Amino acid sequence: MSQYDELRECIISGKKARVGELTQQFLDEDKVAKEILDEGLIPGMAVVGKKFQEGEYFIPEMLLSARALNVGLDLLKPHLEASDVKPVATVVVGTVKGDIHDIGKNLVSIMLRGGGFEVIDAGVDVSPNKFVEMAKEANADIIGLSALLTTTMPSMLDTVQAFETDGMRDKVKIMIGGAPLTTEYAEKIGADGYAANASLAVEMAKKLVGV
Amino acid sequence: MLCSRERVQKALNHQEPDRIPLDLGGSGLTGMHVSTVYKLRQALKLDPPGTPVKIVEPYQLLGEIKPDIVEALHVDVVELTGTGTMFGFKKNGWKPWTTFDGTPALVPEGFNTVPETDGRILMYPKGDKSAPPSGEMPKGGFYFDSIIRQDSFDEDNLKIEDNIEEFELISDEDLDFYSVESKRLFENTDKAIFASFPGLGFGDIALVPAPWLKNPKGIRDIEEWYVSLASRREFVKEIFERQCEIALANLDKLYAAVGNRIDVIMMSGTDFGLQSGPFISPNVYRELFKPFNKKLNDWIHENTSWKTFIHSCGSVLVFIPDFIDAGFDILNPVQVAAADMNAENLKKKFGDKVTFWGGGVDTQDTLPFGTPDAVRAEVSERIKIFGPGGGFVFNTIHNIQPKVPIENVLAMYETVREYGNYPIAK
């Protein structure tokens, strides 16, 4: 039995309010934020991802757990920053130009945060240059591009090219996701990876930065 | 040669007609984006250049499929739908409008939109600009999306009434319209009639934000609704129960108005699949959705000759036995490229129990990005797989989107004409 068992279980079952209470309680008890993260929140979300992969959890259950995770992460964030804890890597995510669909992108963001990544959300309808600017500003390791529409898939190519034009392409890994996309499309536009769902996106991101 | 209506009916009865029936524009889920309709009309030389095309569905910007295009392409289905739109205004008072890609169009007078400073355009419920906007299209976009208007709510005091405001008894005025229009289509065309009436599908995510309501209450945020399928099942079930009662009363009225003149009725547009697998648990479908789908479908089969149509995008293999059990006669859009949706397997497993209305060509890849030869190859292969024994109506996988090469669209229809005659060549 670990003292973080209940916290972990509450992430898995998506009990948002209880995650908040427990996280706050641990902080009040002067537990180290990194420990709460590594032993409570992250292992909980790892189970959620596994259950999704195995067909036990579906989108509603994932969203419920993701919301619970977010509550815990928000409470920990100032403490993690104050103690200078380094994230696994920094990811800038956004929905590409012309596209304003964000449910998939938001879910990927939370899953990445749950995987220990620092996530900077660029929002929706993000222009190629904006992605480049934000990547520079955040010193990003990975760029995550999302699109739902066949009409906005070409914006992904434009974004990859904007990184090339700016001489930034070698400094970042680019991964893509969204309904009409495939591994073949990622290869075709010169992206580094494709993930078919939010859980696989975390695995892909880890692979891209070698952890 | 059979007339179109007989052709569709035979296919729906799992018999081989003279050729595979073809749908284009029979519903808001089997149509074509206005900019592609425009290009197609130009390519078929149906209009002088610059002739605008009516946007008959202002949310997805679907273009009107007029009788001349129906004749030119040998389409077998016509649409029977109401006078309203997703944004609550009526389809009348047509005025010119140009899409971002420069397509000349006509839109209803309630389509009141001007570009914002950032270039995007907004849409207002019932065309009323004093109400908060309910739809937006980014600059350069091709479709509207709902703007989520979600008030804060008290988890312990959620009210069913708030989430069923949009479900009401169909007005006498609308019933008269359906009656007259169904007679007109039945008597003046030989096409199969595909009807779409409001309030029959449960939990369709496109409808949850209710972009036609000025001040929707209850759960209206898309993500919040999805979460509710896991955390508030009793609440959702109660919404569906109340909706189902109203829908049953409406079916009775609709049958009195249109009789057996219609052939197909849109019963559900709720998406249960992702590209990669089921969206929700099959158990949640069985517990939450299926009982209500079945109640309405059973009523229809007991009282009418209508065939029931379900649209669900994505990978839905695991749901198909339940769809059939719930009384759906027709499955659409048959998204063959999604996970586990192999065409041969679907035909072999379910081909004698459900009609595949769709699956003709991939609109995510082959049609927009492939060559005309790739389109021909895919279409002829699908005809060979889905055609034998009937139970197949040719349609693309969902609406034909914008930015699709018109040569590909033409290649698709040519191939249907060339390979679609029974008996299907092996």
Image (spheres, coloured by chain):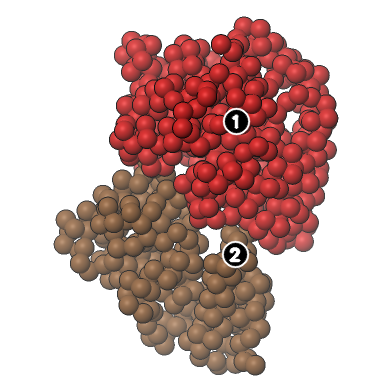
Chain colours: A brown, B red
Three-letter amino acid code of the residue under disc 1? Gly
Splitting the image into 4 quarters, where does residue A41 fall? bottom right
Q: Which residue is mark 1?
A: B389
Query: Along the line of sight, which residue is nearer the eye, A37 or A199?
Result: A199
Residue A115 makes an appearance in the image:
yes
State the residue at coordinates (43%, 53%): A178
Q: Disc 1 vs disc 2: which is toward the camera?
A: 1
Q: Residue B121: where, in percent of width, then height?
A: 43, 36
State the residue at coordinates (37%, 31%): B376
Question: Which numbered disc covers residue A36?
Answer: none
Question: Tag 1, which secondary structure?
Answer: loop
Q: Which residue is mark 2?
A: A55
State the residue at coordinates (32%, 67%): A142
Instruction: Point out the image quarter for the N terminus of chain B.
Output: top right
Residue B58 makes an appearance in the image:
no
Q: Residue B54: where, in percent of width, then height?
A: 47, 19
State the residue at coordinates (81%, 19%): B256
Query: Label 1, label 2: how many angstroms apart (C-alpha)?
Result: 34 Å
Q: Is residue B13 left or right of residue A73?
A: right
Three-letter amino acid code of the residue under disc 2? Gly
Is residue B123 depicted above or below B177 in this figure? below
Q: Residue A121: where, in percent of width, then height?
A: 41, 62
